[in-house]
Amino acid sequence: MWNLDGREHFVCFIIILRNKVFMISTSNLRLFICLLLLSLFGYAKAQHDSLFVQGYISNVQDHDVNFILFEPKGINGGVMRWDMSENDGRLNEGVVDQVFRCTSSGTHYFEFSYSLDFPWSMMKVGFWAGKGDTIRIEGDGYLNGTWNITSGRPEQKEQNFYQQACMAEITAYQNAIWDYAKYREWRRDTLDMSEEEWDKTTIRIKQLESRMDSLEQVWKKSIIKVMKERPVGNVWVQNFVSMVERGNLELAKEMKKLYLLKEQELKQRPDADLLWSMVNQSTQAKLLGYCIDGEMYDLNHRIYHLKDFRGKYVLIDFWSRFCGPCIDHFPVMADFYERHKDKLVMISLTTDDEKAWRECAHHSKITWLNLCDRKGMHGLAGSYGLQAMPTFVLISPTGIWLKRWTGSDNIFENGVLENIINGKKSKNHENTPLYDSPDGEPADGLLIGKQSERDSLCRNLEIR
């Protein structure tokens, strides 16, 4: 009990919290206010660095749906990160109330996907938002491509235009996915089936697969038709990237025509050449064949080519700032490089966009060549068939693609790479020409920014 007579020179404050009375001195009040402000600041920051997803989906079972958020890396391909909701991603009697982490400023493209207990595959659903946004979802049934998504961002309104224009095609395609997946689920759970019945179900599955693939192409072509009429912007580019990455050879030809049709608008964008490279990657390197060359840039914009390193082995390390195993290799790579740099040129070639690469460069601790070809997964990474990271490609002193290693096997410590560059497991390719081109110049695998070729293609394709 405090003595509150006149000789005590401090003030007491009475605070009422939840019908309870607290008496706090001046000094303790300062501490209380500081803690309260810190709590409020932390709460406000958490609110600002989050995406809130709310809404209602009817005619679904709560346990069937578990939302996961994906953030694609953009034109360079791949997924930058994925995130589970803080509320475990589940529905609550159809009510959507999810919170996802989001620290990137500006407007970004995200994708939702079902996961875990949902037993059949559905498409990812894209939307545009930024940190602090509240996304509204309204839907009826499991066909997530038909759900209405709003975020208040102009890009989302454009995305919804595409959705409405192609609603019939996407509904037919997702219904085909549904029929295929449910039939396979039924066959999996049917145990007492004769061999004849099993053969019949196999034929039926192939029929459903064919129908699904056919309707997918119809849906994609409907998007391309809309793209021909819409202005080039972020949504247009995202659709372009999705069509190229998920399409077949026939669709790739359509995308090249579409690029040429919209070339004047695309020229205004800094990523125009990269988009062109996605539909015009004409040369693939072949193992034990000629290496594919191209321009690579360091942090000071100095240009390098593989032909610059004739007479030494060249090890290309394809990596990304979002690949943990890639970065984990850096310490042993540094040690290996110091011991063998008289015979070996080592290049870490990022698949990230230039901005992300530069942001990471000062923390990556790369003491060898740290380069970027500004083409992401569609540059040299595409020419050498990159499918996973880390991936290492070894070029001989005469320009022959000797080996490729993918995954976490540590070639720097198990002696494999060391034996090759020391001649213990050498290949007899030393008399093979370095480049397969009549003038001795490198066979550039990517035809980027060549206006004369684009004009020729326009004439050949009769683009009007």
Image (tube, helix red, strand yellow):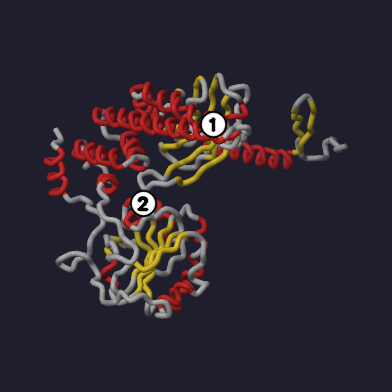
**In the depicted view, which residue is nearer to us: 434 or 347?**
434
Crowd around label 2: few <14 · some 14–19 · many ≥20 (10 Å): many
Q: Residue at 32% x, 56% y: name it.
A: 383
Which quadrant of the figure has residue 186? top right
Crowd around label 1: few <14 · some 14–19 · many ≥20 (10 Å): few
163 in relation to 440, above or below: above
Q: Position of residue 284 (x, y in %)?
A: 30, 56
What is the number of the mark on residue 396? none
> Which residue was labeled with disc 1?
197
Q: Secondary structure at mark 2?
A: helix
Q: Earlier in the sequence, mark 2 or mark 1?
A: 1
> Which residue was labeled with disc 2?
377
Instruction: Give the Cα separation between the discs numbered 2 and 1.
Output: 45 Å
Picture quarter with the C terminus: top left
Q: Position of residue 7 (x, y in %)?
A: 83, 39
Q: Residue at 63% x, 34% y: name it.
A: 191
Which quadrant of the figure has residue 119? top right
Picture quarter with the N terminus: top right
- Specify whether 250 is left or right of 418: left
Q: Position of residue 312 (x, y in %)?
A: 33, 75
Q: Residue at 47% x, 33% y: name it.
A: 205
Can residue 150 be seen from the camera position used here?
A: no
Which quadrant of the figure has residue 90? top right
**In the depicted view, which residue is nearer to us: 286 or 265?**
286
**In the depicted view, which residue is nearer to us: 342 or 24?**
342
Q: Nearer the viewer, mark 2 or mark 1?
A: 1
Q: Position of residue 88 (x, y in %)?
A: 62, 35
Residue type beneath disc 2: Met
Residue type beneath disc 1: Glu
Q: Secondary structure at mark 1?
A: helix
